[in-house]
Amino acid sequence: MFLTATSAFAGEPIQSLLLDDHVIYTVPIGTNRVTTISFPGAISAIDAAGVTVDPKIPGQFQLAHAKGTAFLSVRALAPKATSNINVRFNKKTYVFELVESDQPVLSVILDSKVSGNTVEPAPSVSPTRLLALLDKAKAFPLLKKQQPESVAQVEFKSFSDSPQITDCGGYEIRIEEVYRFNPEDTLVFRLMLRNKTGEVIVYRTDRFALRVGNRLYSQSISDASGTIPPNGDAIAYFAITGTPDGGRNELSLKNQFSVIVERLPIPLIQANTNSPACSQILNPQANQPTNSPKAQP
């Protein structure tokens, strides 16, 4: 889990979270409040951008940390300020994105094990509701224009300028858009599947999966044709909800995503096959803060 500046944490200024060096912790910070981030042991090093330790030196945030201690404190110095800090602990790097907010979290307590009553379970989302989320994602541009209140709480990210592509040899998987529905803890992805061969490609529509760092999330629903025409493209949608162990995923849209699609042989369409060896193509000009390694499904 990691913290996001959404209404889900309103009224909860103290958060206990699991240590995970493969996610981004987005922490709301106040201008008139101090936020303290605590680790289970002494911090080795801190790297930051736009952050000052001297109030006389301009910066987006002010940081306080004493060498050898297990905590640091941060305060925003300007409205709408954003920045990030990387904290080195126990030979791993943990990434925090700082966002100025009028509803700051005052204490973030990180540990390798969080008691069960502090981990929020994933919401129960019915198949009918998942279908409704897919429909809302498909109609998002129109709804945003004509009924903006209906998508006011939907987070959206387009990858048109910095595509995330997984190359699977004969075909590639391009993430075009992703939508986050926070109350349902569900992410909906719009994919472009491109066939680079002269033969039709058949794939399983019930086995979409998402890799974020070293974690794998199976689909909760999908809408796809199951085929990609020769030398052609096909659009597909799929969603993930929660985590495999029943908790909330709280995945930020700023993570590096990799999608897995299971190809089927022809004509044995019903046979199970191993996922193809795919390699992710990263846009060299893309500047996406993520702590996830390159995906190698």
Image: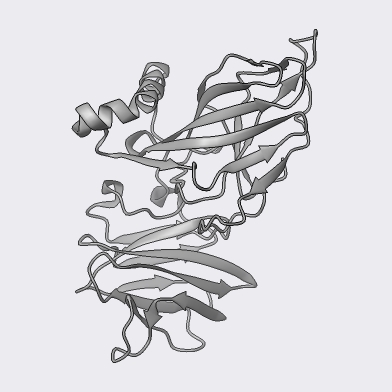
Percent x, y of residue 18: 49, 57
Quadrant where the C terminus lies? top right
Q: On the image, which quarter does residue 266 sit in?
A: top right
Q: How is the image coloured?
A: one colour
Percent x, y of residue 39: 48, 71
Percent x, y of residue 135: 37, 20
Nearer to us in this view, 212 or 179: 179
Counting every numbered tag in the picture gives 0
Q: Residue at x 42, y 48 (%)?
A: 119
Let me know if residue 270 appears in the view: yes
Q: Residue at x 47, y 43 (%)?
A: 249
Using residue 173 as the reference point, say whether residue 96 is left or right of it: left
Nearer to us in this view, 30 or 230: 230
Nearer to us in this view, 230 or 81: 230
Percent x, y of residue 69: 48, 84
Using residue 146 as the reference point, say whether residue 283 is left or right of it: right
Q: On the image, which quarter does residue 57 sit in?
A: bottom left
Let me know if residue 40 appears in the view: no
Q: Residue at x 65, y 72 (%)?
A: 91
Q: Residue furthest top?
A: 267
Q: Is residue 178 above or below residue 251?
A: above
